[in-house]
Image (cartoon, grey):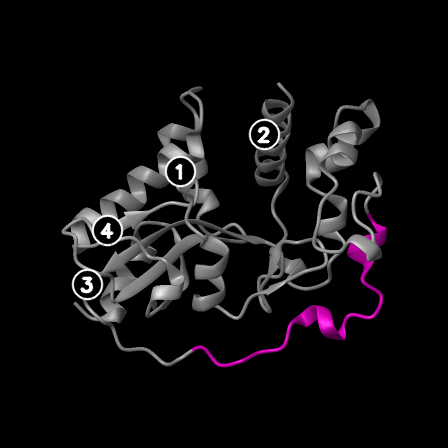
Amino acid sequence: MSLEELQVAVTAAGIAWRGAFHPTSDDHVPPLANKCPAATVVLLGFTGEMGWNTFAAAPEARDGNSDPLDRWSRRVIGGLAHALGGTAFYPFAGPPWISFQRWAQRAEPLHHSPLGVLIHPRWGLWHSYRGALAFAERFDFAPLPPQASPCESCAAKPCLSACPASAFSPVAQQRLDTAKCGDHLAQGASGECRDHGCLARRACPVGAEFIYSAAQAAFHMNSFRRHLLSRNE
């Protein structure tokens, strides 16, 4: 199997190809299902609405059971692993937790944004990771070229001033004040963030054409709100 054939299989499954890397010991990639070390890791996820539309049409999205996106991710990525002879790993399966942010930065030209979310030069903040496929085979591909963060040339940084809850500030970059954010979302006036997605995130000009649809944004915001509530229980 070639890397191109692997990409075709991933695209046919309706999930976005998110780059690949050759792991080192510093990446802490677990052994494969056959106990062999991984030689290539491929990341999969969403870019804009790519991947989301497949999930939204899937039975997991409509069956009313808990964790629909995680269950869909396991089915789709686990199915690819079985069909392609790889081992599946997930960012939500832990502890122990896998450092998907490190893996992502090894696979694509990503940087930490002032909001703490990894920013992509094309997709902006409108992307995510749902899992990875690891292979014993070392696929050939060009090394990731260095690329400056798009935030370095953004003097205004509208993302930091757009948050109605002031949950981000220039003096506390790359950290979300979850208490302020949660209090805001609990109020009746929070509809703009709750229904259409984080205002701070939407203020970023990078990749604005890939902004999530209302349904996609509301799904992720509702998941975030449930996560905040579970932390306070």
**Residue sitting nearer the eye, 69 or 39:** 39
Q: Report whether 125 appears left or right of 24.
A: right
Q: Amino acid at mark 1?
A: Gly
* Residue 90, picture quadrant: top left
Count of numbered labels shown in the rendering: 4
Would you name the residue on which mark 2 appears?
227
Up/down of 187 relative to 78, above or below: above
**Residue sitting nearer the eye, 87 or 32:** 32
Crowd rating for badge 3 (residues with CA inside 10 Å; few <14, some 14–19, many 20+) = some
Q: Earlier in the sequence, mark 1 or mark 3?
A: 1
Would you name the residue on which mark 1 appears?
94
Q: Is mark 4 in CB contact (under 8 Å) with mark 2?
A: no
| Alpha carbon separation for disc pair 1 and 3 | 23 Å
SS for dot 3? loop
Q: Quadrant of the C terminus?
A: top right
Q: Is mark 4 in CB contact (under 8 Å) with mark 3?
A: no
Q: Residue at x 80, y 62 (%)?
A: 157
Coordinates of residue 156 in the picture (x, y in percent): 85, 66
Which numbered disc covers residue 136? 3
Coordinates of residue 221 in the picture (x, y in percent): 63, 35
Q: Residue furthest front?
A: 25
SS for dot 4? strand
| Alpha carbon separation for disc pair 2 and 1 | 15 Å
Q: Is mark 3 in CB contact (under 8 Å) with mark 2?
A: no
